[in-house]
Amino acid sequence: MSTTTTDKVHQIINPAGQVVGDVPDLPADKMLHLYRWMVFGRVFSERMTALQRQGRMGTFAAATGQEAACVGRAAALQPGDWLLGSYRESLAYMVKGVPLLAQLKHWGGHIPEGYSYEAGCLPFQIVLGTQMLHAVGIAMAMKYKREPHVVLGVCGDGATSEGDFNEALNFAAVFKAPVVMVVENNGWAISVPRRQQSAAATLAQRGPGFGMPGYLVDGNDVLAVYQMISDCAARARAGEGPSLVELLTYRMGAHTTADDPTKYRPAAELQEWAARDPLLRFRKFLMDRHWLTDLADEELHEAVGTEFQAVLAEYESLPPPDPRRHFDLALTQLTPQLLRQRAEILEETHN
Ligand SMILES: Cc1ncc(C[n+]2csc(CCOP(=O)(O)OP(=O)(O)O)c2C)c(N)n1
Ligand SMILES: [Mg+2]
């Protein structure tokens, strides 16, 4: 396996919706399945943000603008494969099989929720980069057990500055772990821009330094993401070792509902990326092939909204989360400070 990297960005559909690469051989219903998930992801991020503003949901991390990257990578995996990510992985986890209700419960403060061992997804990691170590660990277990599966470890551009990210890549390369390491470069780590994160021209360049190939992919092109992750997963499955894939995308919204990006981000940058919206270009691709019409697209948006509302109603009929669990599941012995906080919150919530 070559360990060179190329600065050429892998792309199949350009921002204008034109085909510029080899389209993967997928039937129309599979293409529409990818699109449906992308629309679902957009609606999910919008509604969750609105719910948080109404006091009906906890702090939430939207993935608006990152739908192609999330859907493409998760759809490329097979049952038995694992997908490990951070707080921005909700959509990808749902594509992999984590139920929407579990996501609502997670963001609404019910713990432990938001993941599923059956679907191959561990709890979101909040401590940046740690999931990359877990991904390599699971991959090594699969290798020992000779299981024909792979693990996808996903982190952000900011997380690449963590020691854990670099240790995980080194170990994976040395021991040829069946893992694909994905960096979702959305341009920002809260208020820190990508250029202040690393002096390297691309984050994909790190791969060859560790002895694995590194690839740059247009993360707003769902087919390019799907194909690259499928190819890297196939190589890992065949015992050819890990790869590093950098998905170039953009965080169109705030870091979380607790953030205001207008304080640090130029509006022109957002406009530039809005023109590369992943949904618009895939929609055009599907329409050019007559696989989607305006009417079918409208119906799809409606169906997705109805699906969200139905599960939301189920979620809102549940009793509120028990705040005791946040403390009691974290530590067997609470510190005096935590004991005090526990008592305070019980008083505030009349538990
Ligand atoms: C080890 C660690 N340091 C700092 C933080 C605080 N923090 C939370 S999110 C974040 C930015 C992460 O940016 P990036 O990795 O690019 O992911 P994104 O949020 O853009 O998806 C920081 C610094 C943390 N959670 N963990
Ligand atoms: Mg980022």
Image (tube, grey):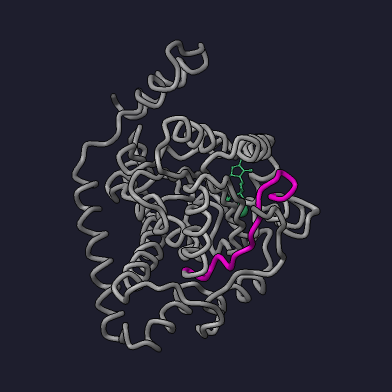
Foreground residue among 56 and 167: 167
Q: Is residue 292 magenta?
A: no
In percent of width and height, residue 299 lies at 24, 77
**Picture residue at 60% right of the left edge, 38% below the top:** 172
Which residue corresponds to the image point at 49% horizontal and 72% vertical from the top-left?
278
Image-based side of 181 in relation to 123, left or right: right
Q: Is residue 213 magenta?
A: yes
Residue 258 location in percent, x, y?
53, 49
Q: Relative to 177, does residue 53 appear above or below in the rendering?
A: below
Task: Give the total of numbered labels.
Answer: 0
Task: Name the residue at the right extreme.
Answer: 199
Q: Foreground: 65 or 234?
A: 234
| Figure check: 231 above or below 148 | below
Q: Which residues are magenta?
A: 207-222
- Quarter of the picture holding the C terminus: top left
The residue located at (66%, 55%) in the rendering is 214
Q: Where in the figure is residue 308, as x and y percent of width and height? A: 27, 59
**Relative to 134, is 88 above or below?**
below
Placement of 180 over or under 223, stated as above or below: above
Give the image quarter of residue 202.
bottom right
Kindly identify the residue that appears in the image at 62 percent across and 57 percent down: 246
Q: Is residue 235 left or right of residue 287?
A: right
